Amino acid sequence: MTYRVFIAALIAAFSLSVEAHAAVKVVTTTQDLAALTTEVGGDKVTVEALARGYQDPHFVEAKPSFVLKLHGADLLVLVGRELEMAWLPPLITQSRNAKIQPGGPGYLDASLSAKILDIPTGQITRAMGDVHPQGNPHYWLDPGNGRRIAQAIQKKLSEMSPADAAYFQQRYADFDRRLTAAEERWRAALAPYKGAKVVTYHRSWPNFADAFGLDVVGYVEPKPGIPPSPSHTLTLMQEMKRQGIKLVLVEPYFDLKTPNAIARDTGATVLVLPPSVGGVKEASDYIKLFDYDINLLASTLKTQTGR
Ligand SMILES: [Zn+2]
């Protein structure tokens, strides 16, 4: 075989194998969903996230490259519950990709498999300024929901690539095992501080608080998505002093001016806590996100309480 023939044969063989085992092209809106997709999909998928973990997922600046990524996607995984309402729908339309249109075979709303909190009982519309009109969209911050999302992704990938179903099943089982072990570690780290009262900037943490026994008693924002106002801040500081609350959790993408003013007035500590994979470089996958947040929380609470 001449060298040229050999190369041609090699290319042909390679193209054939690529065709037979073409990786599923997945685009996710957030790095959290990308991390969970990678856990399950391994090397049978390619995954790209649109928003970065250090950005406010409610308000992401849409780039032309997002449309290009969506155009080539086999599967779009989104957080849903209107988290991406302000930026995603026009991009999906512009992608001209029938597969990933709402209701299409490549459209996966991860919230449909998750436990959702803060579901409004009355009439709540975005006109009132609340960016959580469909329940709390930060539900990935409960490891139980991480597991449910991973399972939904496993099911969807298996439908799209049945030949790899056993592979996805094995990857999911491995993730589930590691997550279960990690949950025991996390609960133990925070057990001494069960019921600790905190204030958070945005309403990002109800699932996390439920999972780990924190008590969120107030928010720097008057309503989700509404910037702090002097009257709300004053009421909040009075309440914090009345209840002796010494911890303010702030997502990395918010201005620290109001939290710092609150801390000066109440003697509280401001802790910048990333709610997403990629929010800080240490939070490089789903389990490491919780490792980072829980270590930081536990060490701060330990200093504060002496426990
Ligand atoms: Zn939110």
Image: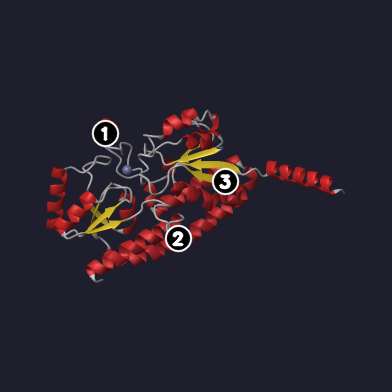
Tell me the SS state at disc 1.
Answer: loop
Residue name at image x 31 percent, y 65 percent: 298
Cα–Cα gap, marks 3 and 2: 26 Å
What's the colour scheme?
Answer: secondary structure
Residue name at image x 37 percent, y 47 percent: 139
Name the amino acid type tagged 3. Thr
Q: Name the residue under label 3.
A: 46
Q: Nearer the viewer's eye, disc 1 or disc 2?
A: 1
Question: CB at mark 3 closer than 8 A to ligand 1?
Answer: no
Q: The C terminus is located in which quarter?
A: bottom left
Q: Tell me if I can see residue 171 in this picture.
A: yes
Q: Mark 2 points at which residue?
A: 180
- Look at the numbered discs 1 and 2 and tell me whether their residues touch, using CB distance below 8 Å: no
Q: Nearer the viewer's eye, disc 1 or disc 3?
A: 3
Horizontal side of residue 15 vs 54, given as left or right: right
The tag earlier along the polypeptide, 1 or 2, is 1
Q: Mark 1 points at which residue?
A: 124
Q: x and y percent of residue 294 in the render?
A: 35, 61
Tell me the SS state at disc 2.
Answer: helix
Q: Quadrant of ligand 1?
A: top left
Q: Quadrant for residue 81, please give it.
A: top left
Q: x and y percent of residue 249 in the render?
A: 27, 54
What is the crowding at mark 2: few (fewer than 14 residues within 10 Å), some, or many (at least 20)? some
Name the amino acid type tagged 1. Ile
The tag earlier along the polypeptide, 3 or 2, is 3
Horizontal side of residue 191 vs 220, given as left or right: right
Residue name at image x 73 percent, y 46 percent: 14
Name the amino acid type tagged 2. Thr
The tag earlier along the polypeptide, 1 or 3, is 3
